[in-house]
Image: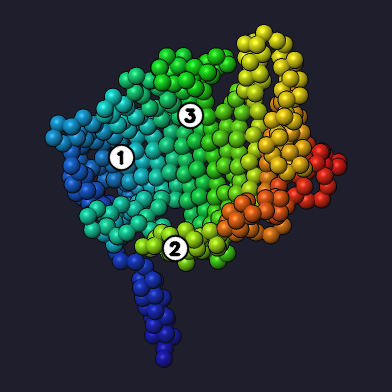
Amino acid sequence: MSFQRLTASVSFAVLAGAVLSQPAWAATPQEVADALVALLDTADADLTYDMPVVTGGEVTISNISARAAGGDEGEAEIGRLTLVGGDLVDGNIVADVLRMENTRFSGEGSRVSIDALTVNGLRIPQDPDTAAPPSMANIPTHVEATGISIETEDEPAVTMTDFTVDFSGTETSDEVRFAMAMNGLTVSDLQDLAALDEDDSARYLVGLGYDQLSFNFATEASWTRSTGELAIENLTVEAPGLGSLSASLTLGGITEDLMNLASGDSMEAAAFAAASVITLDDFELRFEDDSITRRILEQVATERKVPVEDLVQQLVAAIPALMLDVENPPLREALGGALATFIQNPQSFAIRFDPPEALPLLQLYVGGSTDPEQLLRQLGLTISANGTTFETGAGPGSAGPAPGK
């Protein structure tokens, strides 16, 4: 074979391999635009919008307005909708990025506004009536919204700085991860909310000296297919000026077989199997104070007309009597000691279960009713306040602050 023929054969093989390794021909941006318009036109609403503008790999539709059909109350507006890297795949409109700007929803006395919404990894069925069942392939990899406002006729506005969700994993990947965060969720006027007859909690917070509430929320979780481990690594609700509550949890035994059983017809069998198979590996719940405990103590002291220091000492003195219902002596002493420490100087309070061996949920249920003390030892329970750990009899040591703590 001549060198020229050999070179031509190799070149053809490389080109053929490259073509065959690619998916079907990608849809043109105009075809994506047409599919998007067709999808909009299926909406059961009175719909108006500007014709799509195709620029490079982007499709943009502006001034989308939808009113509920049949005279029902409800309206949606999208200032601009942009698809980046769009395609048509297996009856779905897919896009690398979806951007929505100046979105408004209103109806029945409420209004929701979102300045900007971004979705990565979008996948929308072109025909919702024939769409495939939900799967991980349809879950966006990233969602982010900023400038969120919720208004109602009778209540003060609730605003949120941003909201994000991240997801990674496929139907075959060993690990699936999920994360969500909300920042700056704010009720701007507690006085107005407290004026509502049914909202006692708002009135109580106003009495403690709060004029607005702001929250931040975050959580991360993962599931490992090969081991069946579900880990909630960080779930935190933070309210500046009040405090923060955080939790972590690890469960084992949540396998695909178990989830398939849960989706079957016999929920009773699934529940029993879950209790027998799912295990508690560890759990922690922690509260960090940011003045709310002190404010409550000061308010109660004012109502009783005593100095707050005297009230604190009265509460500490009453703790042993309050703990009498706790039948386990080491646990009673540990819990009482931790509460006394926290009340005298509110900083942090935490409980943790850290079993030497993973415990099936069914064993927790049975042990709680047959041998609570043995269960307590198996759980590896510890209680801490302000960084001091109090032994519960679940492990080495005795009640009271742990050595070196």
Query: Callout 2, which amino acid?
Result: Ala
Q: Nearer the viewer, mark 2 or mark 3?
A: 2
Element on which disc 3 rests = strand
Residue at 22%, 51% (x, y): give it. Answer: 35
Which residue is label 2 attached to?
269
Q: Residues within 10 Å of mark 1 (few under 14, many from 20)?
A: many
Q: Determine which quarter of the picture holds residue 318.
A: top right
- How far apart in space, not on screen, are marks 1 and 2 (Cα)? 47 Å
Residue 151 in the image: state x and y as whole percent. 36, 24
Is residue 117 rendered to the left or right of residue 343?
Answer: left
Q: Amino acid at mark 1?
A: Leu
Marks 2 and 3, Cα distance to the nearest angstrom?
A: 41 Å
Residue 360 position within the rendered picture, expressed as x and y whole percent measured from the top left: 60, 59
- The foreground one among 53 and 193 is 193
**Do the residues under discs 1 and 2 have CB atoms within 8 angstroms?**
no
Residue 278 visible in this rendered orientation of the protein: yes
Could you say where residue 305 lies in the image, as x and y percent from the top left? 67, 8
Q: Is residue 83 above or below residue 197?
A: below
- Contact between labelled residues 3 and 2, with CB atoms less than 8 Å apart: no
Specify the quadrant that holds the C terminus.
top right
Q: Using the image, tell me which numbered label, if any, was put on residue 185.
A: 3
Q: Residue tagged by mark 1?
A: 81
Label 3 and label 1: CA atoms lie apart by: 25 Å
Q: Residue at x 67, y 50 (%)?
A: 372
Vertical placement of residue 29 versus 302, above or below? below
Q: Is residue 27 visible?
A: no
Q: Secondary structure at mark 1?
A: strand
- The residue depicted at 42 percent of the width and 30 percent of the height is 147
Which of the two residues, 92 or 272, is positioned nearer the viewer here? 272
Q: Amino acid at mark 3?
A: Leu
